[in-house]
Image (cartoon, rainbow, N blue to C red):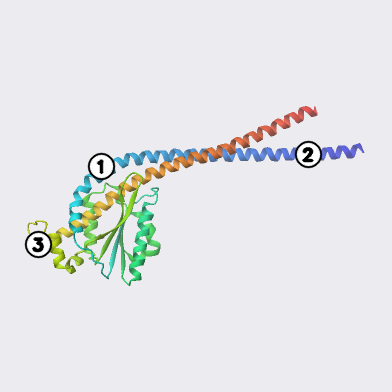
């Protein structure tokens, strides 16, 4: 009888010890995993805070570039905006102005979406569509579905400061392709927290030639040209292409930097909230481990 009792008690104590060992091992593994995760979240938060500081410093420079560059391009843009817009059938070229880097919210996604919607609408009417992309993110977003529509692409434009000379090179390539119709899709800076994705109708040489001469003269006669408008029109039109691309790009860069600041701030805030939740789990697991060890110590002392 006593031997059966001791055997039962021995089995119970062995099973209890094994359960305690399992709990202890499980808590130790949980504590180590949570500690590693907390360290990773903290490192991530440091990185996002540093990226926000870099974007803040870069934003001041981009904002200054936009404020100095837009007055240079706006007079030519306002001149051509006086021309009447006619919705004609025919091939169309979409110029998507995006960035080369990510982590800036949905600025590049919004541009790619507008290009996709525009191509779908034009091809539903039976018009041929072509795409010119400025920026690596636009290439990545559009190449999978619309790679056969690509006419040309310009990547890594942000590696060096973007100037009007760079915009002129892109405009020269665009002008040489001879688009029948052209629309530039880019982001227009409004404030630190808001922007608009706009689809700007860009007048081509073909549209100017087929435009009603009365309307064309009415829009241009308010300005004086020397030499005459007919002699400088071709050069003026190429300069107009350059102004459109330059103005769109510097506004897109400023928007990108502002949205990167907001995205990194939100990422740092989310990392802080995540760290708090993981820290709470860590403290609970640590408390459970300490409680288990105390119970084992008390049980051992009682047994003695």
Image-quadrant location for residue 79: bottom left
| SS at mark 3 in the image | helix
Q: Residue at x 38, y 55 (%)?
A: 109
Give the CA separation, mark 2 to mark 3: 102 Å
Task: Using a 10 Å C-alpha cutoff, classify the residue at mark 3 as few (fewer than 14 neighbours), some (14 to 19) or many (20 or more).
Answer: few
Report the mark closest to the observer, 2 or 1.
Answer: 1
Quadrant (top left/top right/bottom left/bottom right) for the N terminus: top right
Give the CA separation, mark 1 to mark 3: 35 Å
Q: Is residue 148 visible?
A: no
The single residue placed furthest to the right in the displayed view is: 1
Query: Where does label 2 land, which residue?
Result: 14
Task: Point out the tag, 1 or 3, that comes first from the N-terminus.
Answer: 1
Report the mark closest to the observer, 2 or 3.
Answer: 3
Give the CA separation, mark 2 to mark 1: 75 Å
Task: Point out the tag, 2 or 3, that comes first from the N-terminus.
Answer: 2
Q: Position of residue 80 (x, y in %)?
A: 19, 58
Q: Which mark is residue 64?
A: 1
Q: Which mark is residue 231?
A: 3
Q: Is residue 196 visible?
A: yes
Task: Using a 10 Å C-alpha cutoff, classify the residue at mark 2 as few (fewer than 14 neighbours), some (14 to 19) or many (20 or more).
Answer: few
Q: Which mark is residue 293?
A: none
Q: Position of residue 144 (x, y in %)?
A: 40, 62
Q: Position of residue 155 (x, y in %)?
A: 32, 54
Q: Residue at x 34, y 63 (%)?
A: 118
Q: Are marks 2 and 1 in contact (CB under 8 Å)?
A: no
The single residue placed furthest to the left in the displayed view is: 227
Q: Residue at x 70, y 40 (%)?
A: 22
Quadrant (top left/top right/bottom left/bottom right) for the C terminus: top right
Q: Are marks 2 and 3 in contact (CB under 8 Å)?
A: no
């Amino acid at each position: 009888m006593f031997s059966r009792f001791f055997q039962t008690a021995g089995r119970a104590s062995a099973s209890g010890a094994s359960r305690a060992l399992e709990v202890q091992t499980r808590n130790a593994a949980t504590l180590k995993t949570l500690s590693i995760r907390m360290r990773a979240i903290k490192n991530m938060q440091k990185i996002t805070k540093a990226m926000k500081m870099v974007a803040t410093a870069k934003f001041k420079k981009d904002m200054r570039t936009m404020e100095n560059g837009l007055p240079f391009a706006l007079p030519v843009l306002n001149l051509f905006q006086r021309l009447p817009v006619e919705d004609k059938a025919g091939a169309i070229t979409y110029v998507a102005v995006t960035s080369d880097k990510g982590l800036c919210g949905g600025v590049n996604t919004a541009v790619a979406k507008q290009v996709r919607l525009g191509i779908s609408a034009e091809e539903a009417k039976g018009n041929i569509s072509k795409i010119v992309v400025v920026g690596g993110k636009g290439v990545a977003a559009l190449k999978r579905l619309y790679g056969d529509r690509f006419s040309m692409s310009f990547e890594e434009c942000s590696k060096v400061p973007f100037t009007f000379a760079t915009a002129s090179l892109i405009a020269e390539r665009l002008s040489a392709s001879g688009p029948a119709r052209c629309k530039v899709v880019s982001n227009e800076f409004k404030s630190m927290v808001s922007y608009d994705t706009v689809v700007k109708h860009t007048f081509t040489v073909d549209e100017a030639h087929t435009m009603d001469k009365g309307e064309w003269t009415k829009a241009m006669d308010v300005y004086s040209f020397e030499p005459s408008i007919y002699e400088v029109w071709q050069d003026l039109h190429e300069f107009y292409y350059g102004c459109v691309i330059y103005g769109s790009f510097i506004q897109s860069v400023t928007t990108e930097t502002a949205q990167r600041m907001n995205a990194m701030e939100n990422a740092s805030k989310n990392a802080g909230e995540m760290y708090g939740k993981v820290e709470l789990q860590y403290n609970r697991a640590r408390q459970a481990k300490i409680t288990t060890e105390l119970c084992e110590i008390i049980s051992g002392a009682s047994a003695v």
